Image (tube, rainbow, N blue to C red):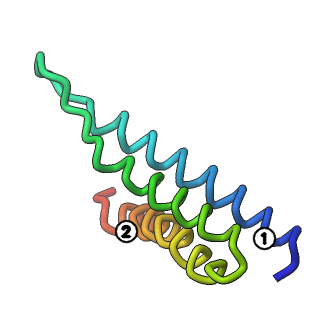
Amino acid sequence: MSRIVWIIMNVVTGLFVAFSSFIGFLISGIADTDEPTNDYRILIWLLVWIIGLVLQYKLETRLLGIIISLIPAVYFIYVYISVIYVAPS
């Protein structure tokens, strides 16, 4: 994989996962209760992406890092597509 494609893939997936994680975190806190209801578990996807990014810097673990960093992006794409097709009109 060329270096430019690798950098573009990491930037795009990183921004997508970060945006989706923070939006999911903020939306999970919408409630009419006095207690904060934000779900911090959604931010684990951002942590998984960061771990995949760190693994990409060593040549021996680059493929594993690419796979791990794509897992959160694929998950959020699946969630967005399922919301589009399952949500009532």
Q: Earlier in the sequence, mark 2 or mark 1?
A: 1
Q: Position of residue 28 (x, y in %)?
A: 28, 39
* Residue at 44 percent of width and 47 percent of height: 21
Compute the Cα span from label 2 to label 1: 28 Å
Question: What kind of element bears circle 2?
Answer: helix
Left or right of 12, for residue 21: left
- As rendered, which of 37 and 89 lies closer to the eye? 37
Q: Residue furthest top?
A: 34
* Residue at 58 percent of width and 74 percent of height: 65
Which is in the foreground here, disc 2 or disc 1? 1
Q: Name the residue under label 1.
A: 6
Residue 61, compared with residue 44, is above or below; it is below
- As rendered, which of 10 and 74 lies closer to the eye? 10
Left or right of 73, for residue 13: right
Amino acid marked by disc 2: Ser
Q: Name the residue under label 2.
A: 82
Q: Position of residue 33 (x, y in %)?
A: 11, 21
* Residue at 44 percent of width and 61 percent of height: 80
Left or right of 2, for residue 52: left
Q: Where is residue 4 in the image (x, y as percent from the top left)?
A: 88, 68
**Which quarter of the figure has residue 8?**
bottom right
Residue 7, compared with residue 60, is above or below; it is above
Question: What kind of element bears circle 1?
Answer: helix
The crowding category of the residue bearing disc 2, from other C-alpha atoms within 10 Å (few below 14, some 14 to 19, many at least 20), is few
Q: Where is residue 61 in the image (x, y as percent from the top left)?
A: 61, 79
**Which quarter of the figure has residue 48?**
bottom left
